[in-house]
Image (spheres, grey):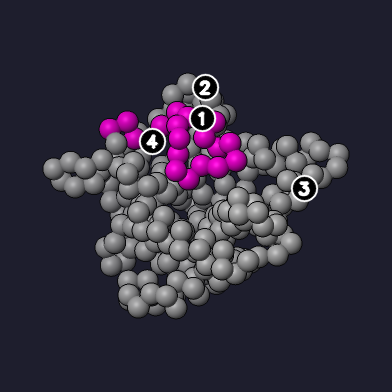
Amino acid sequence: MKVMFLSEIDGENSFFHFSNKAHMIDNEKGPGIPKVGISNEPRQRPNAYSGDENYPCTYFSKGFGGVLELFDIWIRGNYDSHAKKNGLCSGRFCVDDKLMEQEYDDVIDMLKNAVYLKLDLISGNDPYTSDYCDSKEDFRKRELLDHDILTDADKDLMWYYGVNSDFTTARMDRWNMSTHLVNFKHDIPPERITLLLSSDGHDDALSILVEIYTKYRNSTGKIDDLDKFMGYLFNKSKDKLYLFEKK
């Protein structure tokens, strides 16, 4: 299994995918990439929602900016889902502070039990010889753009997708890219997958996210909800693991 420190990565042009540690395998040498690598086969994924589990593809973000935007949006999207399950209104109208703190704790637990992977992907139109195409569409944005009148669900989507999503086009945003949508097995082999480590050698996705945020926040745009999450995390944690010196 290939391993790299975050500081060794091209933070602008690399592709990143996070995965629950349960999807890794344990062997005599410790955690490793599954022998098949990462597959696009539909499955019940713990991080899937809004029908994602029905789409045979692998999701990823481009660049450190895409990683930060993903979790800014993830926080709002998960909050909205939990709010509706609890009989509350969409977050586009108001946000319940207590429920949002619960969401923060859920995200912290999820990231502590996940890893971040760097994927070496091949761009192109042919799904047999490439992994993804830059012009691929986001199915949720396409549905919204096809509506003559925006539904409440459309407006909720626009709220949690936020300002870092371009709704003038259905094209994928850098935080929410995916491999070709095909009905055959498309693996990203182990030799094109690298496990990322933080500067002090931790492999959990929380350490990776915090280091990216701390070092590269100022080069990213508006991510207000991730800013609030990080403030909550820094105040909650006394562990210096989650504090990195800014560049």
Report how far apart the C-alphas of labels 2 and 1 lie in the structure.
Answer: 7 Å
Q: Say the numbered circle drawn on residue 38.
A: 4
Q: Is residue 237 visible?
A: yes
Q: Earlier in the sequence, mark 1 or mark 3?
A: 1
Residue to which mark 3 is pinned: 152
**Label 3 neighbour load within 10 Å: few <14, some 14-19, many 20+:** few
Q: Earlier in the sequence, mark 3 or mark 4?
A: 4
Instruction: State the quadrant of the N terminus.
Output: top left
Residue to which mark 2 is pinned: 183
Q: Earlier in the sequence, mark 2 or mark 1?
A: 1
Q: In the figure, 58 relative to 15: above or below? A: above
- Identify residue type, mark 4: Ile
Residue at horizontal 52 percent and vertical 61 percent from the top: 103
Taking depth in this image into account, of 193 and 86 the one nearest to the observer is 86
- Identify residue type, mark 2: Asn
Q: Is residue 202 left or right of residue 96?
A: left
Q: Where residue 107 appears, x then y in whole percent?
A: 46, 59
Taking depth in this image into account, of 63 and 51 the one nearest to the observer is 51
- Which one is in front in this view, the residue at disc 3 or the one at disc 4? 3
Asked if the residue under mark 4 is in contact with the one under mark 1, i.e. CB atoms within 8 Å, the reply is: no
Residue to which mark 1 is pinned: 56
Q: Where residue 23 appears, x then y in whole percent?
A: 34, 41
Q: Earlier in the sequence, mark 4 or mark 2?
A: 4
Report how far apart the C-alphas of labels 4 and 2 lie in the structure.
Answer: 15 Å
- Label 1: which secondary element: loop
Instruction: State the quadrant of the C terminus.
Output: bottom left
